[in-house]
Each structure stands twice: as structure tokens, then as C-alpha cells.
Amino acid sequence: MSTESSAPNRPVKDYETPTGAAFQVDFTWSRFRNIVKERKGDSLTPVYIQHFRPLKPQLQIDDAATKTRISTGTINGVSIAAECTIHGQTIGIKPLSKWKTAYNYFSPALSSAELVAVSWITTWSLKTWDFVCVESSTQSPIAKFSVNLWALKEVGNFYFAKSAAELPKELRDEVITVGLTILYVMATRMNNPLNLLGSTFAKAGKVEDGRAGGVELQERPQDGTKHKQV
């Protein structure tokens, strides 16, 4: 398993918007939830429903068609780290910096052979806040979550590097779950004074192994080596 990870040093503005699969996130005021829709031309097809909960985990994402739970996202009241559970598998999201919007974690969906370090970095303008998801070691783009700062309904759009035909569902589930979780972690940090305390004492930096800011690992009873928990 590869355990090396580094913060991307390429300027985030250099990452162009991917031209692959696209998903629009719309907020519905009547039911107080987000609906994530796949966009193909002028057609929008609901894929996920993201609910807000008062208690942990605060975010719950369900399949729009079957209504079955896909994932959850947990936002902490003091700590600036976060956690997602996707198809029963827990992923720790670790801040790369105490004061910048930068996070990383080990992805179990990017490769079937090993855990891959993934980073989220950001840039913003007067209209949008862009969360860019890249592979940490190569800095190759995976997706961009472009958030509309002033929109009342259209929260933003996910743009993937891979086309809809090439994009594995597991990776799509992971990126959308982690992207939404980081967005609402940052929204909480900007409005919660206790997160200032959490930032001050945060153990920020790159993920180093599967137990620190990554996927939980289990030992194989035969040889004691590690493998991804499924």
C-alpha cells in the first residue's frame, strides 16, 4: 500500500474545469435538503438526496431512486477534522493546514489495488468557491466542486475528469460525499467560534497511514498484513 502523500503545490487556479460527468446540487427550501442531479445536456436526473440532521452524522446521502442510504458525513463542533462513512466504510478527513481550506484522506475507491492519498484544495472569486479534488502524489485532477456563493437554490456543480461511462460509481459516491462534507465543515468553521480553538490545536498535515486520516484497516489473521476494511 502506498503511504506517501503531499500537499499539492500546483496553483489551484491552474486546474481547469473538467469536462467529464457533471452533477448539479440544488437546495430545496420546502424540504430543507439537497438534491444531486446528473446533468446531460439540458436533462437533469436526480441521483442523490442529501439530508441535514441536527445530530451526528449531520449529513446523510441516500440513493434518489431506491431511497437506500449510501453515506454520511460528520462535522465536529470543535475539531476541524471530519469523517465520512460510505457504504459502511469509514474515512477520516484530515486538514492539511490549520488555517487554509485544504484537506486530505486515503481513498479506497480510486484504486482497487491500494489506498491512494487524495487532497482537496480551494480557490474563490466573488461568485464561486471552487473545491478541487486531486490525487496527492501526481496532482492530477479528479473532480471540481464549484460552489455558487450567492445562489439561493443551485448550491453548485460537481465536474469530474472522467466521463459518465468511465466514472466508477464507488468513486462518484466518494467524491460527492467528501465534497459536500468539506463544504459544510467550512461553513461551520466560519460560523462557529469553537472551531477557532479547534484550528489552533489541530494536528494538520498529510495523511501518513490508514489509521491517521484514512480508511480503517484490519489485520489478516493469516499473516498480520493490512487490507482495506469493506
Image: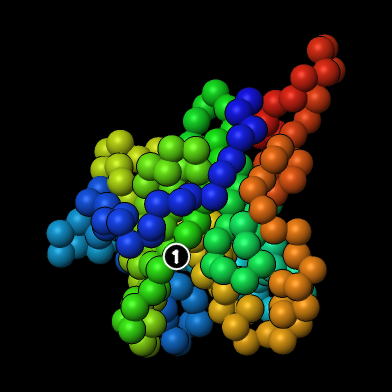
Residue in the image at 76% along x and 73% along y: 200
80 versus 22 height, above or below:
below
Q: Amino acid at mark 1?
A: Thr
Residue at image location 69% in from the left, 58% down from the top: 204
- On the image, the x and y values in percent for residue 109 come to 52, 38
Screen quadrant of the N terminus: top right
Position of residue 211 measured from the top left corner of the image (x, y, whole percent): 76, 41
In this view, 215 is above or below 159: above
The answer to whether 186 appears left or right of 213 in the picture is left
Residue 105 visible? The answer is yes
Tell me: residue 183, above or below residue 95: below
Q: Is residue 119 left or right of residue 106?
A: left
Label 1: which secondary element: strand
Q: Counting other residues with Cα less than 10 Å from the Cα at mark 1, is it few (<14), some (14-19), or many (20 or more)?
A: some
Considering only vertical position in the picture, is 160 above or below 24? above
Taking the spot 33% from the left edge, 84% from the top edge, the residue there is 126
Q: Residue furthest top?
A: 222
Which residue matches tag 1?
Answer: 122
* Colour style of the rendered protein structure: rainbow
Q: Position of residue 91 (x, y in %)?
A: 66, 48
